[in-house]
Image (cartoon, grey):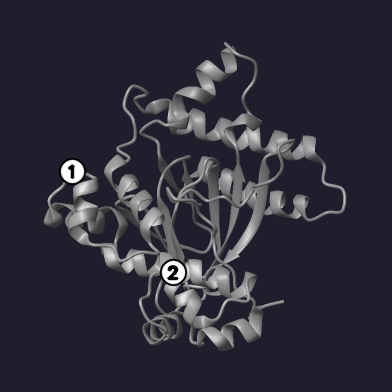
């Protein structure tokens, strides 16, 4: 089975491109079990995202909120929100993602359309919206996603038609959901959690001490741990371990470094400890994983 992982920067931002500069749109299917970790780990992106579950049942976590979505249901996630997804136990789930950058809809400076229908909502309290096929306007959004994926898979996509469909989806969200929300309040994104994630991304290759991490964000150790667990759904050290595993997977596939060298570069301290953690996550030893998936 071919696996993958989401590439992120030091703040947790996904850096894989979605579309092109000329047409910043991507529509793709995510099969959760094919991720290196067996789930989609915490990340955020600059694009707006609409997801529709196509198989199984998915646990989506957005910031500190958790939703269980079944086949035919979906979710909208605004730019900048930390989120992750995993299979509900006993299911093999997949979902389609429609990702597009806000600049696809934005126009000239001082545009009336931007001021009234786009800019007020990109970072508003509407940070996410669960989409149900039982509500007519939400069902209409969900019904657009599969045709959009199919349109992208043709040899010569009709980009203008795709653009109009995306505008229609945004119009539905604006008219029925976003317009009813206050625009003077920001989504309570936790800047402190973003700072913790950034600290870990900078220092994962080193021994990370809780007291130093907590001090870097001006919190007591216990407060730091509670805040992170509340917002991320895992402990700080579970998250550090996942970051190290993702970095090690990249080195296994993209370099000829030995397993011991990779273990040291990724902060595991010893090759034996690295081997145990990697096999617990993937079912394979690092060496076997490299032999199976390296080109």
Q: Nearer the viewer, residue 19 or 77?
A: 19
Q: Earlier in the sequence, mark 2 or mark 1?
A: 1
Residue 103 shown left or right of residue 267 in the figure:
right
Q: Quadrant of residue 292?
A: bottom right
- Residue drawn 37% across and 23% down? 183
SS category of the residue bearing label 2: loop
- Residue drawn 30% across and 66% down? 207
Q: Distance between the residues labelled 2 and 1?
A: 26 Å
Residue 212: x and y in percent read 21, 54
Question: In the displayed structure, would residue 294 be above or below residue 11?
Answer: below
The nearer-to-camera label among 2 and 1 is 2
Question: In the displayed structure, would residue 276 be above or below residue 154?
Answer: below
- Residue at label 2? 266
- Residue drawn 78% across and 56% down? 153
Tell me the tag on residue 218: 1
The quadrant of the picture occupied by the N terminus is bottom right
Q: In which quarter of the image is residue 172?
A: top right
Residue 162: x and y in percent read 73, 40
The quadrant of the picture occupied by the C terminus is bottom right
- Residue drawn 42% across and 68% down? 244
**Can residue 192 be seen from the camera position used here?**
yes
């Amino acid at each position: 089975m071919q696996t993958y992982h989401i590439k992120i920067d030091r703040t947790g931002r996904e850096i894989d491109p979605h579309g092109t500069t000329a047409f910043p749109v991507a529509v793709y299917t995510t099969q959760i079990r094919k991720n290196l970790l067996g789930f989609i780990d915490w990340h955020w992106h600059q694009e707006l995202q609409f997801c529709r579950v196509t198989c199984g049942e998915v646990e989506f976590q957005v910031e500190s909120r958790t939703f269980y979505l079944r086949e035919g249901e979906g979710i909208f996630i605004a730019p900048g929100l930390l989120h992750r997804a995993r299979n509900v136990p006993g299911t093999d789930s997949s979902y389609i993602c429609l990702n597009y950058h806000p600049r696809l809809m934005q126009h000239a400076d001082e545009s009336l359309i931007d001021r009234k229908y786009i800019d007020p909502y990109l970072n508003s309290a509407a940070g996410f919206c669960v989409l149900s096929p039982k509500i007519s306007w939400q069902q209409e959004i969900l019904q657009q996603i599969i045709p959009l994926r199919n349109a992208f898979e043709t040899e010569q996509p009709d980009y203008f038609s795709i653009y109009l469909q995306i505008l229609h989806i945004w119009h539905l969200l604006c008219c029925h959901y976003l317009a009813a929300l206050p625009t003077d309040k920001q989504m309570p994104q936790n800047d402190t959690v973003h700072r913790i994630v950034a600290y870990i991304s900078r220092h994962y290759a080193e021994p990370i001490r809780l007291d130093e991490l907590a001090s870097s964000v001006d919190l007591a150790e216990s407060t730091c741990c509670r805040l992170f667990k509340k917002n991320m759904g895992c402990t700080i050290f579970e998250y550090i371990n996942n970051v190290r595993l993702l970095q090690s997977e990249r080195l296994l596939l993209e370099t000829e470094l030995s397993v011991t060298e990779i273990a040291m570069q990724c902060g595991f301290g010893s090759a034996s400890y690295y081997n145990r953690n990697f096999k617990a996550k993937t079912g394979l030893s690092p060496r076997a994983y490299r032999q199976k998936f390296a080109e």
